Image (cartoon, helix red, strand yellow):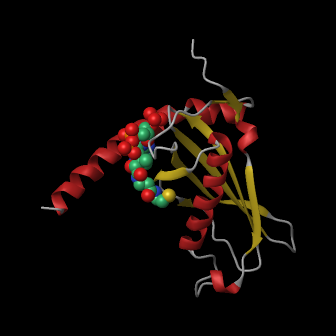
């Protein structure tokens, strides 16, 4: 039985809401993918640091699925939560919702999973608490995380091989 400290998933919930302004949009009048990705990384890193209470670095970002365009004038909300913990790594789930402020219509615009690693004072990966899910959605996210972690491991191996190939 592990005697690592635990924290509830809900304690890591990090929410950021803002207007989509013209400088952040492309010529279609929709939010730049790159701007959204930067916001996803920022919000997720706060959830991870809140959980670990250590400095954290992004180890990987899974594909961001852009489901619906986010239009200029919409409110965009990012909700991030730590969903799974290894020894030093954390998976963070981010849900992005667009809201048309005049009609109140809301839709999920994108979803993303990222992995952060906590670094100790020596700059090496540090042990973090275990995350505990409570609701059905949280349990689903936690139980399905191992499979996503396996995909990441094999992708990392592929990337390392590719880096080796291109450095020759
Ligand atoms: C992420 C990093 C700290 C991992 O260091 P490392 O020497 O590979 O450490 P380890 O092999 O011991 O792995 C440490 C943890 O990271 C996880 N990890 C490493 N690379 C990963 C990846 N690409 N995706 C997901 N998890 C990863 C490991 O599974 C391990 O998890 P665990 O402790 O929960 O079991 C290191 O690769 C790094 O510093 N990368 C650059 C980070 C960066 O600059 N980010 C952008 C700016 S924040």
Quarter that holds the N terminus: top right
Instruction: Name the residue furthest left.
Output: 168
- From this view, report whether residue 10 is shown above or below residue 98: above
Instruction: Name the residue furthest front.
Output: 122
Q: Position of residue 34 (x, y in %)?
A: 53, 72
Residue in view at x 57 percent, y 16 percent: 2
Q: How many marks?
A: 0
Residue 87 shown left or right of residue 142 in the figure: left
Q: Quadrant of ligand 1?
A: top left
Residue 71 shown left or right of residue 4 in the figure: right
Location of residue 15 by image quarter: bottom right
Q: Position of residue 139 (x, y in %)?
A: 66, 30
Residue in view at x 74 percent, y 29 percent: 134
Residue in view at x 86 percent, y 71 percent: 103
Residue in view at x 46 percent, y 40 percent: 125
Instruction: Name the residue furthest top.
Output: 1
Q: Position of residue 129 (x, y in %)?
A: 61, 31
User: From this viewpoint, is residue 29 visible?
Assistant: no
User: From this viewpoint, is residue 58 visible?
Assistant: yes
- From this view, report whether residue 29 is shown above or below residue 166: below
Quarter that holds the C terminus: bottom left
Location of residue 36 by image quarter: bottom right
Residue 159 shown left or right of residue 48 in the figure: left
Q: Of residues 113 and 60, which is closer to you in this image?
A: 60
């Amino acid at each position: 039985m592990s005697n690592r400290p635990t924290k509830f998933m809900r304690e890591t919930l990090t929410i950021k809401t803002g207007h989509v302004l013209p400088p952040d949009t492309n010529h279609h009048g929709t939010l730049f993918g790159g701007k959204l990705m930067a916001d996803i990384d920022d919000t997720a890193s706060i959830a991870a640091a809140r959980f670990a209470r250590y400095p954290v670095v992004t180890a990987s970002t899974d594909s961001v699925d852009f489901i619906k365009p986010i239009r200029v004038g919409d409110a965009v909300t990012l909700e991030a939560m730590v969903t799974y913990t290894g020894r030093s790594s954390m998976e963070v789930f981010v849900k992005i919702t667009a809201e048309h402020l005049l009609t109140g219509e809301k839709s999920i615009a994108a979803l993303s999973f990222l992995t952060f690693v906590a670094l100790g004072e020596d700059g090496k990966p540090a042990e973090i608490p275990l995350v505990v899910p409570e609701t059905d959605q949280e349990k689903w996210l936690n139980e399905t995380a191992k499979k996503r972690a396996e995909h990441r491991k094999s992708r990392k191996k592929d990337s390392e091989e590719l880096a080796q190939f291109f450095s020759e």
